Amino acid sequence: MLIGEFRHTIDGKNRLSLPAKFRQEMGNKVILTGGLDNCLFVYTTDSWERITARLSGPESSMLQADNRSFNRYLLGGAVEAEVDSAGRILVPQYLRERGKLEKGKVVIVGVRDRAEIWDEDRWNEYRKGVEQRADALAEKLGQAGVI
């Protein structure tokens, strides 16, 4: 399970070192794609297979515009990335732009079956907002039977 928060820098060649803990769980190849909330998602190949199977499953009709649009967003921007011997992946420029990672200082967050790559300033802002609403979020999830 991917958990934790790690601060790293994307170097001048668009390479990003994955946390050692994540490298052990993710293997030598990962899938990078645009995420939600202005971050990038990083999936293991197994997790990616499960996600794409659900997106193309019987309950996800290509006749529905929202399904087509989300599939295009998630799958169309995805790329396989090899983890090199130093534990780095190449983040294509178009994904850096999509994730607004131009400054290069990032936070890699483990979110169970995926990692998220955030611009450091955006992550700090986002986290602060969630922390301020944590009680209300827990209440809402409790009412929905999630926790």
Image (cartoon, rainbow, N blue to C red):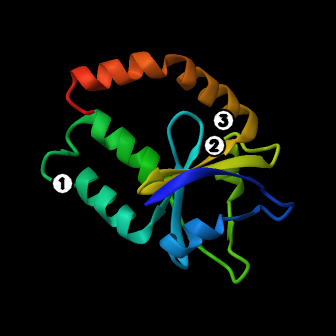
Residue 142 coordinates in the image, percent (x, y): 26, 24
- On the image, numbered disc 3 is attached to which residue? 123
| Amino acid marked by disc 2 | Arg
Q: Position of residue 87 (x, y in %)?
A: 68, 74
Q: How far apart are marks 1 and 2 (CA)?
A: 27 Å
Residue 56: image x %, image y %?
24, 54
Residue in front for this viewpoint, 140 or 53? 140
Q: Which secondary structure, mark 3?
A: helix
In terms of sequence position, does the residue under pointer 1 or pointer 3 come before the other? 1
In the rendered view, does 141 fall on the left or right side of 19? left
Please tell me whether mark 2 or mark 3 is closer to you in this view: 3
Q: Which callout, 2 or 3, points at the residue further toward the start of the chain?
A: 2
Which of the two discs, 1 and 2, labels the residue nearer the N terminus? 1
Residue annotated with mark 1:
57
State the residue at coordinates (50%, 71%): 26
For the C terminus, the quadrant is top left
Q: How far separated are the C-alphas under marks 1 and 3?
A: 32 Å
- Quadrant of res 146: top left
The residue at the far bottom in this view is 85
Q: How crowded is mark 2: few (under 14 residues within 10 Å), some or many (20 or more)?
A: some
Query: Which image quadrant: the N terminus?
Result: bottom left
Residue identifier under label 2: 98
Q: What amino acid is at disc 1?
A: Gly
9 is higher (above) or lower (below) than 86:
above
Work out whether residue 97 or residue 121 is closer to the camera in this orientation and state it.
121
Q: Callout 2: helix, strand or loop? A: helix
Q: Which amino acid, mark 3?
A: Trp
Look at 58% across and 72% down and name the residue there: 23
Q: Which residue is drawn at 78% across and 57% down?
A: 10
